[in-house]
Amino acid sequence: MENQHLDRRALLASAAATGAALLLPQASEAATPKADAIAIRKALEAGKADTISRLQAWIRHPGIAAEKWRVDESCDFTMGLLRDAGFQMVKKMPTDGSPGIFATLDAGAKRSVGIYFMYDVKQVNPAEWAHPPFEAAIIDKPGYGTAITGRGAVNQKGPEATFLAALHAFKAAGKKLPVNLVLVAEGEEEIASPHFHQVVHAPEVVAALKKCDGIFIPSANQSESGSVEIELGAKGPMEFQLISSGEHWGRGPKGDVHSSLHAMVDSPVWRLVQALNTLVGPDGHTPIIDGWFDNVRALTDHEKALIIEASTKQSEADMKKAFGIKTWINDEPWPVALQRLASQPTVNIQGLVAGYTGPGGKTVLPGRAEAKLEARLVPNQTFKEAEAKLRAHLIKRGFGDIEVNVSGGYDPTETPEDSRLVRAEKAVYARAGSEVTISPRSAGSWPGSVFTQPPVSVPAGSFGLGYGAGAHAPNEFFVIDSSNPKVLGMIDSAMGYVDMLYELAKIS
């Protein structure tokens, strides 16, 4: 594989030097006409500085939904980016939360493709960052090349800006898009998309999306080895808080009192701990909420085979090193652990907050305790079913006083492997020289189910070359110019989107 990647990069360098198209293995089979590819790539190179500036400006318009910070401003800025990229209709879509966006680009083509954007980003702790998280600094990243660092750099503004760069290049080259585009965007993805369905289910949006052959979110899907994984689905999340308080319980203090009183006063904190202990078994990870597994669909033999095959191409040691762990649950072997990752529903505690947490002790009996949790759902669980079973479970066990605040979530998503969308991804990745593995589903989540389920019922997934890391973590980055011969930089990744649009236009 190393020699194959080096040969491909030599071809890319030659192409750049001559102003030629992105040359890839089997380039003669590329979906993009050669003359179009040459002109579009030339436009991409000429517009590279503007592309980077747009991404930097976007990162400087954060939109943190969890904190309701600069969300409208980020929405408006994103709408401006879409207009500049050639969308003729760009409309703000009000919801009960952050606004969404509906945009269309009519190229007069026979086929239409859907695009999903998110414009919001995760929270930050600036003290943990080497560079200010919203400065959008251009840095030299040893082992990776030139990169842009900042919150949202890879998740997802870098890949989305790369996709928009491809649209700008079509315009600059005087080339018509081979497909029409229907784009929907939200500003609440990072809080489990509580209102995105209100955007997608608007009659005009449903009508436009139903005409699409597929919908994808631009992503940086290459690993450091240059390989890519096509995920045929994703787990569904349920974000929720459990709150125990003396005021709501009717026992214990309404506020903090002296800890000596615990001899005769109930503790809301212990009450919460006892409630939490009913959610998972003694092993600390298996959900035991009543009826939780009633509708869970086990992996099919084909899905198991896909995971076992993928396990031979992925490094167990690298993943353990990346996550700072030594063993998997039950000391399971790598292929079994990966099957668990794809098939196991989870109930995870994200955080616990109660009482005093500063230096030393404070001798208080807190009047309130809160746990932030998430559940990850698998087919054929549903978000509504999970919420109902959680509430019923707590009431049945005598914890009806525990407040349950569900803040967001949606169903798992699945897309057929033989859909035009997935077949087009395979073709484009193959031409890029990237080794492809197929995964039944991601252990993470994105709101693809709003597209794959009625009333839209269209295949959906992620697509994109290029590399970045640090999503949800400090020092997030996205590679602009790659020094790794196995990974594409921003211009070559943009050409990947060009090839994908042409592929979707012609694939039968």
Image (spheres, rainbow, N blue to C red):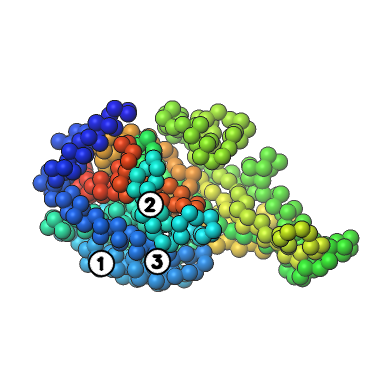
Q: Which residue is mark 3?
A: 61
Q: Quadrant of residue 23?
A: top left
Q: Residues within 10 Å of mark 2 (few under 14, many from 20)?
A: some
Q: Which residue is mark 1?
A: 83
Q: Quadrant of the C terminus?
A: top left
Q: Residues within 10 Å of mark 3 (few under 14, many from 20)?
A: many
Q: Position of residue 284 (x, y in %)?
A: 67, 42
Residue 374 falls left or right of residue 164: right
Distance of label 3 from label 2 (alpha carbons): 20 Å
Which residue type does callout 3 highlight? His
Identify the residue shown where x is 48% and y is 34%.
318
Distance of label 1 from label 3 (alpha carbons): 17 Å
Q: Which residue is mark 2?
A: 139
Secondary-structure class at tag 3:
loop
For the residues labelled 3 and 2, say whether their Cβ atoms are less than 8 Å apart. Answer: no
Q: For marks 1 and 3, give the one nearer the viewer.
A: 3
Q: Position of residue 331 (x, y in %)?
A: 61, 30
Secondary-structure class at tag 2:
strand
For the residues labelled 1 and 2, say whether their Cβ atoms are less than 8 Å apart. Answer: no
Q: For marks 3 and 2, give the one nearer the viewer.
A: 2
Q: Position of residue 163 (x, y in %)?
A: 28, 54
Front residue (pair 363, 140): 140
Front residue (pair 54, 315): 54
Identify the residue shown where x is 22% and y is 67%.
88
Q: For marks 1 and 2, give the one nearer the viewer.
A: 2
Secondary-structure class at tag 1:
helix
Of labels 1 and 2, earlier in sequence is 1
Which residue type does callout 2 highlight? Ile
